[in-house]
Amino acid sequence: MRVTMLMKQETNVDNERRVRQRFKVNAPLSLQIGDQTAPGFTRDLSNRGVYFYLTSADSIEVDGRVEFVIDLPPEITLSSRCQIRCVGKALRKETTQTDLTGIAAEILDYSISR
């Protein structure tokens, strides 16, 4: 019985792909696609990654560069509104049941402005 419990714990750790803690944050996001901006919103966020939704993500390629701005309201920052400008890499793209496209992206560089 003890061996079974240890195996379950190890399996759960082995299946977890995230290294950093993610926070459930629903915040507006603007994705830069060429000279156009596509609106979206975040589902969760960490200091090195983000998962966000867009209505259309046809031009986003997995392993491709993405640039976006996350607008964090005072309710989330507990101070003033700020924007996080990010450069990253799209890791995966998923179509949801609500015709949105979910994008998981690694954040390679960012800057914060208030």
Image (cartoon, rainbow, N blue to C red):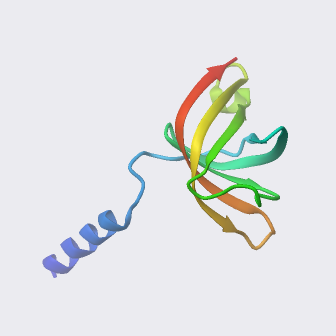
**In front here: 87 or 78?**
87
Question: What is the x, y in percent for residue 92?
Answer: 58, 61
Quadrant, the C terminus: top right
114 over 64 or under it: above or below: above
97 over 100 or under it: above or below: below
**How many numbered tags mark residues here?**
0
Question: What is the x, y in percent for residue 109?
Answer: 54, 31
The residue located at (72%, 69%) in the rendering is 96
The residue located at (82%, 58%) in the rendering is 55
Question: What is the x, y in percent for residue 99?
Answer: 81, 68
98 over 81 or under it: above or below: below
Q: Is residue 105 left or right of residue 81?
A: left
**In front here: 65 or 82?**
65
Q: Is residue 16 left or right of residue 77?
A: left
Residue at the extreme right: 36
**In front here: 95 or 12?**
95
The residue located at (70%, 38%) in the rendering is 68
The image quarter containing residue 33 is top right
10 over 67 or under it: above or below: below
The residue located at (72%, 41%) in the rendering is 27
**In front here: 9 or 67?**
67
Quadrant, the N terminus: bottom left
Question: What is the x, y in percent for residue 8?
Answer: 27, 74
